[in-house]
């Protein structure tokens, strides 16, 4: 019903033009409809019901795609509303791939507190969600930037790598990174380790862990 109600809202003139039929009106928690459409349940019961979560992901993806077709979801919304910054719960993989394919540079966009999507993934998501976001970044920015997102420091000096290690353990995270790089290069992604290391050496925003890795 979301696309239908948004269409009626636009055609009836009940909302200001910038509110897009009510999609950008914020609720009492400060969240608008577009931001809500990328959220997932955080309950333990839902986490254990993988089939249900895949269905939820698919249905909400269909809503996003329909809103895009209607011109009510715009590319710039992905960054403006931090739609790739997930804050826990089940990882919405289908919605993530749809949005990141539409705007890959949103993967390099920091939110209001200076966090990349990969920071949030490292802190809040299961390891498979972290891996998916890391792999997507490497595939879109293979020569140097993708891998260095892993070691980019925020204002507190933390990196996605350090955060992920604190959440999942150094061995598990290292194994995930190495297997991701192997999968990407075996698929023909032109990963350039030498150039990535050179950039890590000269960029003050990249942690020394990036050089070591």
Image (cartoon, helix red, strand yellow):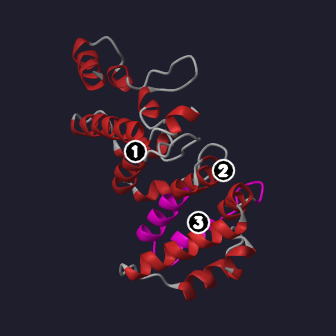
Residue where numbered disc 3 is placed: 149
Q: First in sequence: mark 3 or mark 2?
A: 2
Residue 147 part of the magenta-drawn span = yes
Q: Please provide percent x and percent y for residue 100.
A: 40, 54
Q: Is residue 151 visible?
A: no
Task: Residue 8: name its quadrant.
Answer: top left
Which corner quadrant holds the C terminus? bottom right
Q: Marks 1 and 3, Cα distance to the nearest angstrom?
A: 21 Å
Up-down relation of residue 97 to residue 191 (above or below): above
Magenta stretch in the rendered image = 130-157
> In terms of secondary structure, what is the magenta stretch mainly?
helix
Q: Which mark is residue 123?
A: 2
Left or right, 118 with reference to 76: right
Q: Please provide percent x and percent y for residue 96.
A: 42, 49
Residue 83 part of the magenta-drawn span = no
Up-down relation of residue 213 to residue 16 (above or below): below
Q: Residue at x 69, y 67 (%)?
A: 205
Q: Residue at x 56, y 24 (%)?
A: 30
Q: Please provide percent x and percent y for residue 136.
A: 44, 63
Q: Marks 1 and 2, Cα distance to the nearest angstrom?
A: 25 Å
Disc 3 element: helix
Q: Residue at x 43, y 76 (%)?
A: 184
Residue at the extreme bottom: 194
Asked whether disc 1 touches disc 3, contact meaning CB atoms under 8 Å apart, the reply is no
Foreground label between 1 and 2:
2
Q: Please provide percent x and percent y for residue 77.
A: 41, 40
**Label 1 packing within 10 angstroms: few (<14), some (14-19), many (20+):** few
Q: Is residue 137 visible?
A: yes
Disc 1 element: helix
**Label 3 packing within 10 angstroms: few (<14), some (14-19), many (20+):** many
Which corner quadrant holds the N terminus? top left
Residue where numbered disc 1 is placed: 76
């Amino acid at each position: 019903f979301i696309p239908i109600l948004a269409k009626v809202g636009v055609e009836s003139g009940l909302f200001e033009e910038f509110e897009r039929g009510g999609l950008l009106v914020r609720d009492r928690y400060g969240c608008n409809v577009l931001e809500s459409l990328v959220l997932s349940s955080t309950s333990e019961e839902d986490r254990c019901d993988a089939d249900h979560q895949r269905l939820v992901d698919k249905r909400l993806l269909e809503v996003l795609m329909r809103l895009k077709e209607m011109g009510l979801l715009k590319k710039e919304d992905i960054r403006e509303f931090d739609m790739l910054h997930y804050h826990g719960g089940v990882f919405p993989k289908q919605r993530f791939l749809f949005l990141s394919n539409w705007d890959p540079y949103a993967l390099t966009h920091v939110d209001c507190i200076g966090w990349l999507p990969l920071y949030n993934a490292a802190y809040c998501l299961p390891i498979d969600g972290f891996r998916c976001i890391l792999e997507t970044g490497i595939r879109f920015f293979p020569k140097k930037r993708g891998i260095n997102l892993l070691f980019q420091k925020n204002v507190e000096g933390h990196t996605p790598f350090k955060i992920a290690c604190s959440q999942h353990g150094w061995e598990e995270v290292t194994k995930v990174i190495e297997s991701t790089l192997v999968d990407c290069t075996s698929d023909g992604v032109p990963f350039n380790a030498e150039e990535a290391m050179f950039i890590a050496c000269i960029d003050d925003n990249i942690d020394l862990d990036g050089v070591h890795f």
